[in-house]
Image: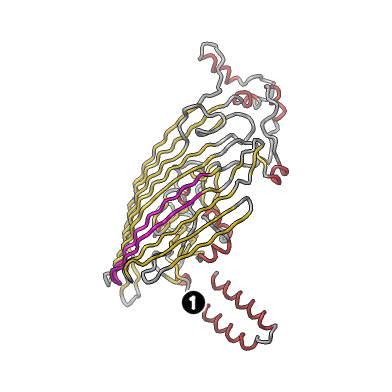
Amino acid sequence: MRRLNRLSAIALSSTMLATFGFAPAYAQDAQAEEESYENEPIIVTATLRAMDVQDIPIAVTAVAPETLERQGVADIKNLASISPSFNIQSSQTETQGTSIKIRGVGTTGNNTGLESSVGVFIDGVYQSRPGVALGDLVDLERLEILRGPQGTLFGRNTSAGALNITTRRPSLSEFEGFANASYGNYDFMNVQAGVSVPIAQDVAAVRVSGTWRKRDGFLKSATGATSNDRDRYMLRGQLYVEPNSDVSIRILADYSKVDEKCCDAVVMRETELQPFFAFHGLTSDGIDQVGRPALQNLSTNGQQYLNSSKQWGVSGELKWDFGGAKLTSITAYRDFQSQSSQDDFVGLQIYSVGTKGVTAAPGTPPNGDNIKAFTQELRLQGTAFNDKLDWLIGGFYGKEKIEAQGVMTLGADFQRANSAFNFGPAAGVNPLFALTALGNGGIPVNSNGANAVNLFDQEATTF
């Protein structure tokens, strides 16, 4: 992509100069520069080695950081704009209900325990869940989208493909820095900055980078609540030490926090049983904004949606060249916590999920996940027989612990709304509600405020 953009710039410059009569001389320079760029290799690490993208037997989309900036791709969710085969979707929450697909293949489900079919690796560290990987893209060296099964080199959970992201290393020889900011509609603001400082010339350096992004929500309900906003920041620091040409040590640490309102939705089709709600004392089915007008006005019917998370991680990378072989060791630990509150997508008080929903009972615990993961990878690679054999052996160990808490509270309209689906007034109140009274001494049961708190544990060890 960089090559194509450069050639486009050459063609544009050639057209402008031709107006002033300089075309013949510049055409020769342009041709020479074009040949130079055609011979320039695009280096990727899709095979866990630094190789020319044309020499590897894998379908790879290699994206330069400059391309991400030009396309306004600030996080993983927007990668589909530059790679149509990559798709990521969120249902109800971004931290718990995110699904990544490549070539249309992926794991779908609003369950944190489901294993993803697309693996995400940042600086060689496996991000155990899609919600954990939804960070901002800042200060990158390269980004690679690997299409198709990658289990041979990247392990499990890569049956559909992998996303391999590498951040920029500190410079050992010179001071570096960057900063950029952008502003857009819905009061969108995005600020990125970073600095690299040598602390021992050609031996050690540190690099610190970060990003802050904020945007107002673009969906608005009849209550005035907005949804699908952005409010997040991330900081990353790293130490890079290269005592000699054979050994390098890289230590990274990062922290990020998200506090957003996600994910309400526009209702495109109303139930055919809407008239029957009146027979049960409800003025409507709670859907006042529906269809194309709702889509054009970005209007919803729900209440408040909240989705927050925070995570931190540390990793260490050791590379050692023994002459005949090169050792790579990557050790990492990550801690991720999330909370969410969701409504029922309609104006009625049917149910709430989490602590801050309209119908949530006092003292209800939060709805969310706590994910802790430790990973260790070792690789030994080299060549033999005058580079006719390129070999690599390695091992991987991972231990993950998930605590997922699911909380739901029923509201005042739950019974009447469900009775409306009982063939309207033909059968009266849903007979299932009448049966509950039999087990309560004949006293009718009121579901308003009834709640359930479920705690799920999952532990996994992989090698």
Q: Residue furthest top?
A: 441
Task: Tell me the residue at 65%/86% (across/down).
Answer: 22
- In the image, the segment drawn in magenta is 232-259
Can residue 448 be spotted in the picture? yes
Q: In the rendered image, is residue 105 in sight?
A: no
Residue at 63% from the left image edge and 19% from the top image edge: 429
Q: Is residue 339 above or below residue 285?
A: below
Query: Was residue 249 drawn as part of the magenta stretch in this picture?
Result: yes
Q: Which residue is mark 1?
A: 40
Q: Residue at x 52, y 81 (%)?
A: 36
Measured as percent of width and height from the top left, residue 65 is found at: 50, 64
Assign the N terminus to one quadrant of the image: bottom right
Tell me: 256 left or right of 200: right
In the displayed structure, 231 sits above or below 359; it is below
Q: Is residue 427 magenta?
A: no
Q: Is residue 207 depicted above or below 432 in this figure?
A: below
- Tell me where residue 197 sits by quadrant: bottom left
Q: Position of residue 434 (x, y in %)?
A: 58, 17
Name which residue type carries label 1.
Glu
Check disc 1 and report its element: helix, strand or loop. loop
Choose between 359 and 266: the one closer to the eye: 359
Q: Position of residue 411 (x, y in %)?
A: 57, 26
Few, some or many residues within 10 Å of mark 1 (<14, 14–19, 20+): few
Depth check, front residue: 62 or 438: 62
